[in-house]
Amino acid sequence: MFRLLRAVPVILLAFGRLTATSAQEEGGPRPIEGVEVIRPEGEFAQVVLEFNVPGAPGAFPGWVYHGSLRGGQIRTDHGMGIRNPGGELDLKNGRLTGTFTRALGRRRDMVVAEVTVDAAVRDGVIEGKAVIAGQEGTVSGRVIPEAELARRNAVSPERGWPSFLGPAGGGTSGQPAGVALVDSADEFRVVWRSEETDIGQGVGSISRFMNGWQDANGMRTASGSSSPVAGDGKIFLSYYVPSPTPRDVPRGWFEGVGHSSFEADRARLAEQSGLAADALPTHALEKIWSSADDVVLAMDAATGRTVWKAVMRDRGLSLQHHKVGPFNMTPAYGEGRVFAIGMSGWLYAFDASSGEPLWEVRLGLGRGAMFSSTAVAVRGAVVAPSQGVWAGFDPATGRELWRSDLRHGQVSLAVWPQGGTDYLLGSAGSAMVCLHPATGETVWRLDLPNQPERAVAVRSAGRGLGSGGISVFGDTLLAYVDETDPAAQSNAERAASLKPHLAAWRLGGGEPILAWTVPVETLHGGNVPVVVRDRYVFAADLQVIRLADGQVVARGEGSKPGNGGYLQAMEDLVFVRRDGTHGRIESAVYRVAENGSVTNLTPEGHWAPPIGGGTTSYHHPIMYPMVEGRMFLRQFDGVYAWDLRKP
């Protein structure tokens, strides 16, 4: 058993866009500088194009493309680049026609081809001819009107996934909706792909250095480490788009990430490619640009339609790298507002429905681990990392409310709702701390003995500091901890006896009360326990543990989280991301029955999206909002909505 130590703006409307300027000093909150809010207009639909061009190169012969039709036009993406579009297709008088450029494949296998479409569209059905890289074939598909999408896929605004770790007090699980889910991962269906085409991949799954020709030319441009979040019937994403605007990069910013200067990197690309410097393609050059536009995007959760898009031109830095540097830019939704951290350390606030810019404040972030922590929105406060610690800000004004002494040593804080207050829980070395959201004061502190006398310590580290090491479900605090044998005498004996456990504490009127502990197998990386069916804890070693008393009722067989992997749950399904690092979205999927027994829905090992590819971020795990039987994945070239409900 554990041995514990006790203690207790100016807005101008013009041509459908908003701009905001301010001359206030940088030190406090101010209107968002230079923001442009775009609200696309025109009739909207989703489009699926299925190409059958046998002689086409690379992956083009049997290619499927998901896109959006807005005002009679499909704006396609380039595939590798995110700053330059691939082209457009026009739907007019019952015909879909046009030519665009698209890149498929990766690195040495990447192929750029010109694609021409000439097809008839009748009653939403597309049939016609396609030419890819000079090879003739056919294209078929369908147009799915917005009204049909909205009718089939409506998401209740009352349910959501408002922050990185999901609903407050939800145990990293979607809010129960009584939705019956499919019996096989093969039945997962794509509903939509985001309308915006400038969403690049998460920073993982690319090479360590993007200033070499093989990767600059053959990898999709990255646009930051960010998970989507859900609230008010919308999906929100914060990301950045590299910009060619020259800027002075803070000294040491690119230290250790491979970049030197734009001129030196461009010369390297020219030499390796054999092209003249002024002939290098945009999709390669954008990998070495140092400026970036910060972007906050709101999408309709039922259709993928862009509701609004806020662009802060040249406010951020572009970091194209595998392991270090970029922020976990995951936004947070709360009480009708959305908050996001930009690539230069600004905390932005917007009205979630309209995109109206509210305020911005400088957080004072630095390099290294401080990039790993994301904002959390609770009732009465938005909490973000600032100058090495967690700080609280007024959601309406941006005024700083408090600054704690709790260092942000994890990617996010867990939220414990009780009596109308959303308490904030985090780890601090060998302690767990509860903060009051209005004042930042420590409500309680649960100290775990330090080495060499340590009996236990919270496992809050891992890739990108880990996802916190702890989660909350109702009034139960769950954490992975290390426990040593109390009989061990020397430091060497204690270290040798160190074993991971899953522990549960009951939360209430004072210090948490230890309820139970269960030994688990060696944990790989930082992940949090997940609660399924409101009464079982699904552990990283696939044990199913009764929440009420810690009784192990079953154990699943199959893939476990490794290499930065993690767990999430929705209804009776648990998703185990087996590799959170290398760019593939590969999840084992388990069903937990009423009695706790486990069925593996992926007996072949894992499910990977057959459409849209994968993405991840090496030091910042990417979570997926799960709402009412829908799962919203950030993938290789955008956000995709997957329907897991039984038809």
Image (cartoon, rainbow, N blue to C red):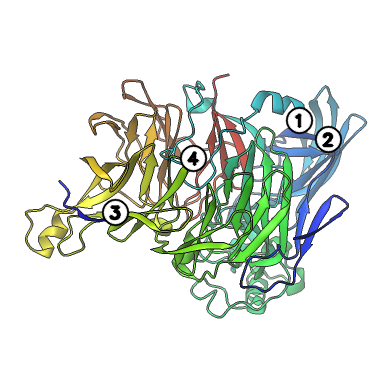
Question: At x 44% / y 65%, what residue is drawn?
Answer: 389
In this rendering, would 568 be left or right of 24?
A: left
- How far apart are the two marked residues, 2 and 4, measured between alpha carbons? 33 Å
Asked if marks 2 and 3 touch (Cβ < 8 Å), the reply is no
- How far apart are the two marked residues, 4 and 1, measured between alpha carbons? 28 Å
Disc with the residue nearer the chain's start (2 vs 1): 2
Q: Which mark is residue 458?
A: 3
For disc 2, the marked residue is 43
Question: At x 67% / y 60%, what residue is drawn?
Answer: 359
Badge nearest the viewer, 2 or 3: 3
For disc 1, the marked residue is 146
Disc with the residue nearer the chain's start (4 vs 1): 1
For disc 4, the marked residue is 167
Disc with the residue nearer the chain's start (1 vs 3): 1
- How far apart are the two marked residues, 4 and 3, measured between alpha carbons? 22 Å
- How far apart are the two marked residues, 2 and 3, measured between alpha carbons? 52 Å
Image vertical order of residue 547 relative to residue 460, above or below: above
